[in-house]
Amino acid sequence: MTNPIPVLRWIIRIAGIVALGMGLAFWGGTGYALLSAHQGLGYLVTAALLLMAVLGFGRGVAPGLLGLALVWGLVVPAIGVLQLRLLPGNLHWIIQVFHLLLGVGAVALSEIIAGRALKGRTAAA
């Protein structure tokens, strides 16, 4: 059977980088026509992160790390959907930075899980 972890890893990397680029374009005031694509990529990254966490359970990855990934996978889309309604006005940049950090964190978390799952490391989170 083929190992799905490297495939998921690349899906997350590519989708995450493209979503990041789109998000930066939005932040710069352009590209709003691609908002649905940005959201779709965000959902793809989140779904792949959740699947990576599930696969990590069977590979001996620390349960605390996998639990964090499951919670992270719920928070990322929630903040993404709600972000336009949170702190409107001059302080909205705080939510934008938080959303950016959550997205980058999702990619980083998936990399950590994939690395540990592929190497069989069981270090505590």
Image (cartoon, rainbow, N blue to C red):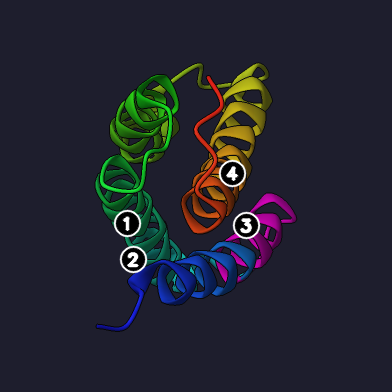
Residue where numbered disc 3 is placed = 26
Residue where numbered disc 2 is placed = 40
Percent across and percent down for residue 65 are: 45, 27
Three-letter amino acid code at the position of disc 3: Phe
Q: Is residue 4 visible?
A: yes
User: Which numbered disc flags the more N-terminal residue, 3 or 2?
Assistant: 3
> Is residue 107 one of those drawn in magenta?
no
Circle 2 residues within 10 Å: few <14, some 14–19, many ≥20? some
| Residue at x-position 32% and y-position 57% | 43
Circle 1 residues within 10 Å: few <14, some 14–19, many ≥20? some
Three-letter amino acid code at the position of disc 4: Ile
User: Which numbered disc flags the more N-terminal residue, 4 or 1?
Assistant: 1
The reply to whether callout 3 and callout 2 are in contact (CB within 8 Å) is no
- Say above or below: 115 vs 87: below
Three-letter amino acid code at the position of disc 1: Tyr
Quadrant in which residue 23 is drawn:
bottom right
Q: Which residues are magenta?
A: 18-30
